[in-house]
Image: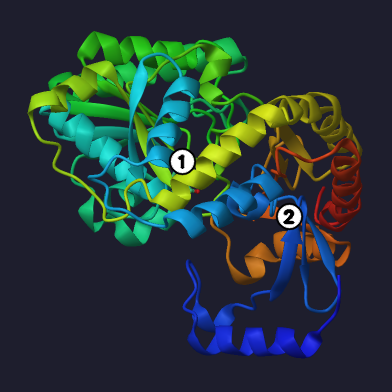
Amino acid sequence: PHADPEAGAAVKAADRAHVFHSWSAQAAIDPLAVAGAEGSYFWDYDGHRYLDFSSQLVNTNIGHQHPKVVAAIQEQAGRLTTLAPGFAVDVRSEAARLIAELTPGDLNKIFFTNAGAEAVENAVRMARLHTGRPKVLSTYRSYHGATAAAINLTGDPRRWASDTATAGVVHFWGPFLYRSPFHATTEEEECERALKHLDDLIAFEGPQSIAAIILETVVGTAGILVPPPGYLAGVREICDRYGIVFILDEVMAGFGRTGAWFAADHWGVTPDLLTFAKGVNSGYVPLGGVAISEKIAETFATRPYPGGLTYSGHVLACASAVATINAMREEKVVENAAEIGEKVIGPELRDIAERHPCVGDVRGRGVFWAVELVKDKATREPLVPYNAAGADNAPMAEFAAACKRRGLWPFVNMNRTHVVPACTITESEAKEGLAILDEALTVTDAYCA
Ligand code: PLP
């Protein structure tokens, strides 16, 4: 990349003067000024290039600046940029048709939103209206978005400041064998006990008061938790037994991330509602949505659906989704994600786990992996406490800095780093990034028993 430190300084100064950043104490942050991006990389104004092992916020599944998607946006911008949601538009119809074709089972109607949180809000609204019941169940260790219902459903510390509006939200424990809430020692036990816990909780909450259960098919930000075989089918059976709507949140796991179009495909499970965003068009233009089953669509066939957004099914966003899905099919991007996970990332991370005292667990599939750092492999004590800040978080901050110095942009959350590159990543890029990760983990080894 071409260096222009002065331009970078001006970008940074204007940012610090006027941009209010998410999730941050404004005085404590130091955002990197980025000059450009392509494929698996982005670069700053000082001539440093970074291999993007975070896919930004786990959304650039097709990589940065994919030429076919960029061309489709340019072409669409020249033709027609925006139209209200009430009109029928070629690219909106085609995006909905393609998404309905890819999603499992009878999810044949698509309600478009601008992003993931709005998809969750609308899925919950549909479930409450469809059932006439008030409550929604979600797991601890989850993230569903930052708007009112979505943040209350979330099971991480970002919820705490917004807990004033939790009416109707009940949290439960999902399966996570490495830190089993059920004292299980095998996946079979974890699955059986997690389903029993959920069933018991429903009995005590009152099944007739529960509109929906929402789960991330594979939990993302809260730790890449892959459900044990049988768990999702078990939740599906519980929902059917009590007339509860089953919502799968595939905002992060969907569109190739796990090496399948949707993570639900790995277990052959069909929810009643499926939320998506991120990978649907890699975030080139904001887009999300809810894929709706025939049964729930039927509820709103004669009764008006009381929800909408000015930019629902935005024309530019839909054009970019059509181009993204077609390019992913033509270039076998989902197949690539599966193969890189199986042949490169999985085996290399398992090797890394053996070599490094600080690595307690590695788990994932496709291009969706977590490396969990611990003080001691035997006790599994996390390398930093849950929700650590400041000095308590120093080991993870040092790890991230060590990656960046070597040209790798990592995803870090609590005591974990996630390996979540683009689904288009090549074998040599994946190896380059994993070699840097391996070196940077010697920094965190120093904190271990
Ligand atoms: N659901 C899941 C599983 C997510 O990972 C996210 C974002 O990370 C969201 C919902 C919220 O999406 P957005 O930030 O686009 O509103």
Residue 13 position (above or below residue 363): below
Q: Is residue 386 above or below residue 214?
A: below
Residue 85 x/y as whole percent: 27, 47
Asked if 399 appears above or below 366 in the picture, the reply is below
Count the labels in the image: 2
Which label sits on residue 142?
A: 1
Residue 220 visible to the viewer: no
Residue indicated by mark 2: 410
Gap in angstroms between the C-alphas marked 1 and 2: 20 Å
Q: Quadrant of the N terminus?
A: bottom right
**Residue drawn at point x = 34 percent, y = 62 percent:** 161
Q: Secondary structure at mark 2?
A: loop
Give whichever of 270, 297 is nearer the camera.
Answer: 297
Please say if 172 is above or below 222.
above
For the residue with label 1, is its CB less than 8 Å from the closest atom of ligand 1?
A: yes
Callout 1 amino acid: Ser
Q: Is residue 22 visible?
A: yes
Which of the 4 image quadrants contains residue 29? bottom right
Q: How is the image coloured?
A: rainbow
At x 69%, y 29%, the residue is 330
Looking at this view, is 232 or 202 the one in front?
232
> What is the x, y in percent for residue 342?
79, 24
Which numbered marker is on residue 89? none
